[in-house]
Image (cartoon, rainbow, N blue to C red):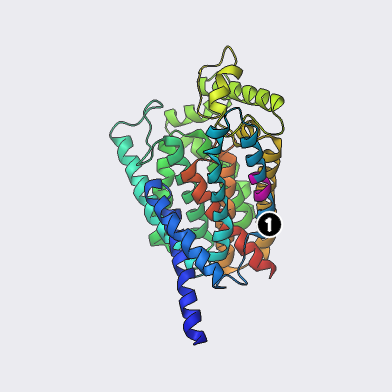
Amino acid sequence: MAENVAEGNGRARAVAAGSLVAVAATSCQLGVANPILLVLIVALWRAWRGGELAGRPAGRKLLAPMALFAAASVASVAFSPHVLASLDKLPRIAILLLAPAAAALIDDTWWPRLVAALAAVATLLAVWGIVQYVQGADTLDDRIHGPMAHYMIYSGWLLLCVALLLTELLLDPRRRIWLLLPPVLLGTVALILSFTRNSWVGLAAGLLVLAAVWRRQLLLLYPVLAVVVWLAFPRPILDRVISIFDLRQHSNYDRLCMTISGLQMVRDYPLTGVGLDMVARLYPLYRRDDAPRWEVPHLHNNLVQIAAERGLPALAAYLWLIGAYLVATWRAAPRLTGPPRAALAASLVATVAITVAGLFEYNFWSASVQYLTLVVMGVGIGRAEEARG
């Protein structure tokens, strides 16, 4: 009888894990991912009620900063100039629970399945984008975006996959080259052809971390790699790289103006921010006279956007969240070997890549990118908890 109950309970956890893998792999298409998310919620609740998650990691290091971020978001709604409009955006705060869910559900059985699913979807999206480039989406005004609504979302999602899959390819002793090499190569090509600089910078940062956790002596080769890239890449790509450092460049100056305006919002509303979904509405009031654009959807920087929208306590919570994750995973890496170490390293490299990219683009609350980021972070923090015993 007990065995039958355990078997039934095991089904709920398996359904939850499979649903989580499906949510992560289809997060590039929210119309598909969100219905699966409902299945995940039900299955996860049943697994928890049935005691199937007892003894599993729970992302405990992340729970306190998440709670503070949620509390700061509630305060931001309460003091918003348009409470009802802000309140409409508040329920999405629950999506943060994807991280502890991933910590509990993605074990040594489900991690290879998650990797395989991401590899398949990333390959499809990379080919989609490359075909768009060949068909004429090869300028800054018309960039590749795959099936997604915007090239920033497309490049951010691919960045996570490329960083994760490359790390898995190099560190996992099983090295499923036939599965992982195509999305890594094609995804990197698509990232380059997207002309999306924040993803390029994020990928460079991720590669530094990959070298640090894989073979640190490779860090010495980075200057050589930079020279090779400089000599091998076509001029339009190099011009785009050089433009990163040119404040006179249109989009760079636009971001500078957004940052200044965002800091002024923080100055006026330091504790609660201007309110959820209020930055775009209030931006014209804070806009610099010489700013290139009158209206912006957000401030193109995770730190500035969170502080301006939700207040300095929310920014502190975000920094605490990222810092707690980085410290826990970095310290755990030397204590792991084999596939668990590869999974943790893949999580770490991908999270660093997307976080650095977030210094130049507001990707923390971009749903497609956020879903996958939280799942990836959950896997890493779960492995870190297992390493601690």
Where is mark 1, residue-wise? 61
Q: Which residue is farthest top? A: 289
Q: In the rendered image, is residue 175 in sight? A: no
Q: Indicate the position of residue 91 as horizontal and vertical percent values.
A: 54, 45
* Magenta stretch, residue numbers: 66-70
Q: Indicate the position of residue 310 as horizontal and vertical percent values.
A: 64, 35
Q: Indicate the position of residue 68 as horizontal and vertical percent values.
A: 68, 46
Q: Indicate the position of residue 88 as horizontal and vertical percent values.
A: 52, 38
Q: In the rendered image, is residue 239 in sight? A: yes
User: Is 374 in front, or is 164?
Assistant: 374
| Residue drawn at the location 63% of the way across and 47% of the way down | 220
The quadrant in which the C terminus is found is bottom right
Q: Amino acid at mark 1?
A: Lys
Q: Which residue is farthest bottom? A: 1
Q: Horizontal placement of 106 versus 215: left or right?
A: left
User: Is 221 in front, or is 114?
Assistant: 114
Label 1 element class: helix
Q: Horizontal placement of 6 versus 220: left or right?
A: left
| Residue drawn at the location 60% of the way across and 69% of the way down | 56
User: Residue 297: within the magenta?
Assistant: no
| Residue drawn at the location 61% of the way across and 72% of the way down | 54
User: Is 127 in front, or is 213?
Assistant: 127
Q: Residues within 10 Å of mark 1 (few under 14, many from 20)?
A: some
Q: Main secondary structure of the magenta part?
A: helix
